Image (spheres, rainbow, N blue to C red):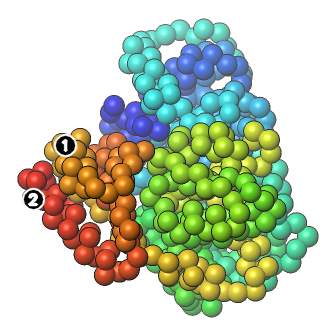
Amino acid sequence: MGIFKTYDIRGIYGQDIDAGLAYKIGRAFARFLQKDRYMVGYDARSHSQELYQALSRGLVDEGKRVTGIGRASTPQLHFFQIQEGCDGGAMVTASHNPPQYHGFKLYDGRGGSVSYARGLNKIQDTVAGMGQDLPVKRGSFSEVDMIDEYIDFVSEPLKGEKITHNIVIDPGNGSSGRVFRKLSKKLNLNAVIINEEPDGEFPNRDPNPLKPESKEMAALEVRRLGADFGAILDGDGDRILFVDERGEGIENFFISALVAEELLDKNPGAAIAYDLISSRALPERILELGGKPVVSKVGYTFLYDNMIASGAVFGSEASGHVYFKVADAFYTESAAYALVFLLKLLKKSGKKLSELVEPLKQRYFQSPEINIEVPDKDEVLKQVEAQHARAKISKLDGISVEYSDYWFNIRPSNTEPVIRLRLEAVSREVAETRTGEITSFLRSLGLGGKE
């Protein structure tokens, strides 16, 4: 697959990706969709603007009408593409990857990801076979600053309400600093925004908010200021993770359970989608609130499709992605929307964030994800299935094994020779014991063991 990954395109600038490739991707994308109108944006990475301009030229040289929104967060691009009825969207971003990486996320007319299984492979083939093709005909390109309507949309749940909570927001020098600055002003929030200015070198922390060290600056600031919580974004502003008033990290599935409470209060019986590596506490809480939990494979494409199929009002991934249904057949991803919902819930409850989350955290114990290098991922899955033949087994995504006191999932990586183990149990003791047993079993197979 090379730089064409399962859900998007990513590689190192100057080695895998350059302006010439971006131009070809623009032309190939246009030929794949065979539609007229496109929207394009770019993140804060050092060469993203150059790639944005090149990709836009490719679309224009296929005769397409292109609207550029400049530097933006991925949720901004996604929202406006659907809002404006554009047939396709392209975000120039490498998401949470290290600074040297650049890339592209492509969307179809309904806002769904053009994944490898849904056309990215065809775009790859078109790019590979493309020479110095002359323009088909000249289309058009116009660039507009589209942010105010997005801020109006994001702030709607708190319209007219006064929020007194003190919060810390860390965009990590990515492309979402402007969004959160404008949102804070719109809602008159008591917000301290750190690492706000876009900087493609990401000088202050890693752009991946899942890394423990990426939460440290926000956590320190929360404790120093006595703030109510902190929010940490990734490089393109589509993942959001939180720390509570003590600066302690909160997994996204617990935050999602709180958001679900607010949404199900207004949409009784609605469906809510989640990925299968989330804590069992999330679907349990959805059921308790009268909702319908819908489990999904891990990944944007699968979760988005499950939301549309079930009419879900909300969807979340353990990685920090969150998705909302904001109108009939109008779904959008928005980290900022999740922040607003959390503020609304905190105001309504009158409790601290840790107090809201603690009952959920007490239900089960989650072991951290373990990545184990193996030469044959398929053989590992077969061996694990045979070893646990008496358990309840699901093959929705990799293999999931369920016992009465613990359950785990093993998924093969799409891009690396590793498998990913996630385990949850009724107690820390059970989790530690079973995690040790499973990892020892894998090593005993002689299939690897490097973590």
Q: Is residue 341 left or right of residue 135?
A: right
Looking at the picture, how far across and down is residue 107, in whole percent? 60, 34
Is residue 156 placed above or below 133 in the rendered structure? Answer: below
Where residue 171 sits, quadrant-wise, is: bottom right
Q: Amino acid at mark 1?
A: Glu
Looking at the picture, how far across and down is residue 155, in whole percent? 80, 62
Q: Residue at x 59, y 43 (%)?
A: 306
Q: Amino acid at mark 2?
A: Ser
Q: Nearer the viewer, residue 434 or 116?
A: 434
Label 1: few (<14), some or many (≥20) within 10 Å?
A: few
Where residue 292 sits, quadrant-wise, is: bottom right
Q: Residue at x 68, y 49 (%)?
A: 312
Which badge, 2 or 1, comes first in the chain's sequence?
Answer: 1
Q: Nearer the viewer, residue 433 or 15?
A: 433
Q: Secondary structure at mark 1?
A: helix
Q: Residue at x 48, y 61 (%)?
A: 278
Is residue 152 placed above or below 423 in the rendered structure? Answer: above
Looking at the picture, how far across and down is residue 411, in whole percent? 34, 50
- The answer to whether residue 428 is visible is yes
Q: Quadrant of the C terminus?
A: bottom left
Residue on which the image places disc 2: 444
Residue on which the image places disc 1: 379
Q: Is residue 413 left or right of residue 196?
A: left
Q: Secondary structure at mark 2?
A: helix
Label 2: few (<14), some or many (≥20) within 10 Å?
A: few
- The answer to whether residue 244 is visible is no
Q: Quadrant of the N terminus?
A: top left
Q: Which mark is residue 336?
A: none
